[in-house]
Image: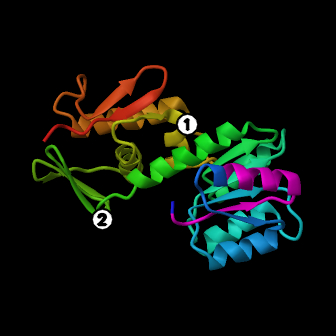
C-alpha cells in the first residue's frame, strides 16, 4: 500500500472517522473538505483510490468525477451518496465512478468495497497478447485466433470476453457485465447478455453445449476458466 487514498468529504466527523479507520487498516490517507480542493489533490498526487462524497461545497462530487475522467485520470472512485439519490448514482457510474455506497453505511462494507476494487485492479492489467489454451488474443487489436484461425467477433462480443477474462476464475454477475460493456445508458436485458455468451461459446468452444472456457454459474452469472497448461 504505497499510494494514499484520498477521502473527499465535507462532514468533518465522518471524514476523521474514515481517515482513522483506513489508517488503522494500514492505508495512507489524505483528506479534503471540499470538491475543488479534492480535485486539485487528485490532479497533483498519485493515488490508490478516491472516496468521494457527492454533496460537496465549491464543486460537487459528480463534477469532480467528471473532470478527473475527462483528464484521463483513472484512479478508482467510490462515491458516497445520500439515500434516495438513485439518479445521481447512475449518473456517477456513467461518468466513470467504480462503485458507490449509500449513507449511512457500515464502515466494514466500505473496507470490503475498497479491497474488492484493489483485487480487481491487481488482476485487470492484461498483457497486450495472451495465449489461453488454443486461443490467441490480441487485446490491442481486438482480435482473437483459435488454432491459428482468426475468429470473427463483434466488438460487443470481444468486450464481454475481455470482461470475463479480467476476472478469470471468479464469477462475474450479469450486472457487472452490463456495467462494464454496455454502461447504464442503454437498456440491456439478461437475455441480451445471454445471447452474447451463446455467440461466444459457439465461436470459442469445441462443444458449445459443454463449454470449457465460459461456464454458467446458475443464479449468479458466468465464469471464465483458464485451462491447465
Residue at 75% from the left image edge and 65% from the top image edge: 31
Q: How many marks?
A: 2
Residue at 35% from the left image edge and 50% from the top image edge: 158
Q: Which residue is mark 2?
A: 141
The answer to which image quadrant residue 28 occupies is: bottom right
Local crowd at mark 1 within 10 Å, few (<14), some, or many (≥20)? some
Q: Earlier in the sequence, mark 2 or mark 1?
A: 2
Q: Is residue 62 depicted above or below 90 in this figure?
A: below
Q: Quadrant of the C terminus?
A: top left
Q: Is residue 202 depicted above or below 18 in this figure?
A: above
Query: Does residue 3 belong to the magenta stretch?
Result: yes
Query: Does residue 53 belong to the magenta stretch?
Result: no
Residue sitting nearer the eye, 100 or 18:
18
The answer to which image quadrant residue 104 occupies is: top right
Magenta stretch, residue numbers:
2-22
Q: Is residue 201 visible?
A: yes
| Scheme of image coloration | rainbow
Q: Position of residue 220 (x, y in %)?
A: 48, 25
Mark number, residue 175: 1
Amino acid at each position: 500500500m504505497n499510494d494514499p487514498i484520498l477521502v473527499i468529504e465535507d462532514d468533518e466527523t465522518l471524514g476523521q472517522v474514515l481517515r482513522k479507520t483506513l489508517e488503522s487498516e494500514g492505508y495512507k490517507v489524505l483528506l479534503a473538505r471540499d470538491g475543488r480542493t479534492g480535485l486539485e489533490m487528485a490532479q497533483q498526487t498519485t493515488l490508490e483510490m478516491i472516496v468521494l462524497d457527492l454533496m460537496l461545497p465549491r464543486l460537487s462530487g459528480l463534477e469532480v468525477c467528471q473532470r478527473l475522467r475527462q483528464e484521463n485520470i483513472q484512479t478508482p472512485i467510490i462515491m458516497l451518496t445520500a439515500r434516495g439519490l438513485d439518479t445521481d448514482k447512475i449518473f456517477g457510474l456513467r461518468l466513470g465512478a467504480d462503485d458507490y455506497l449509500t449513507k449511512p453505511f457500515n464502515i466494514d462494507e466500505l473496507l470490503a468495497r475498497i479491497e474488492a476494487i484493489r483485487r480487481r485492479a491487481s488482476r485487470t492489467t492484461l498483457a497486450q497478447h495472451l495465449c489461453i489454451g488454443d486461443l490467441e488474443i490480441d487485446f490491442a487489436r481486438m482480435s482473437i485466433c483459435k488454432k491459428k484461425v482468426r475468429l470473427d467477433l463483434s466488438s460487443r462480443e470481444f468486450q464481454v470476453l475481455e470482461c470475463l477474462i479480467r476476472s478469470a476464475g471468479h464469477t462475474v454477475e450479469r450486472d457487472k457485465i452490463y456495467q462494464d460493456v454496455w454502461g447504464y445508458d442503454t437498456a440491456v436485458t439478461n437475455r441480451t447478455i445471454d445471447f452474447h455468451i451463446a455467440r461466444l461459446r459457439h465461436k470459442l468452444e469445441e462443444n458449445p453445449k459443454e463449454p470449457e472456457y465460459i461456464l454458467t454459474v446458475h443464479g449468479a452469472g458466468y465464469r471464465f476458466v483458464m485451462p491447465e497448461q
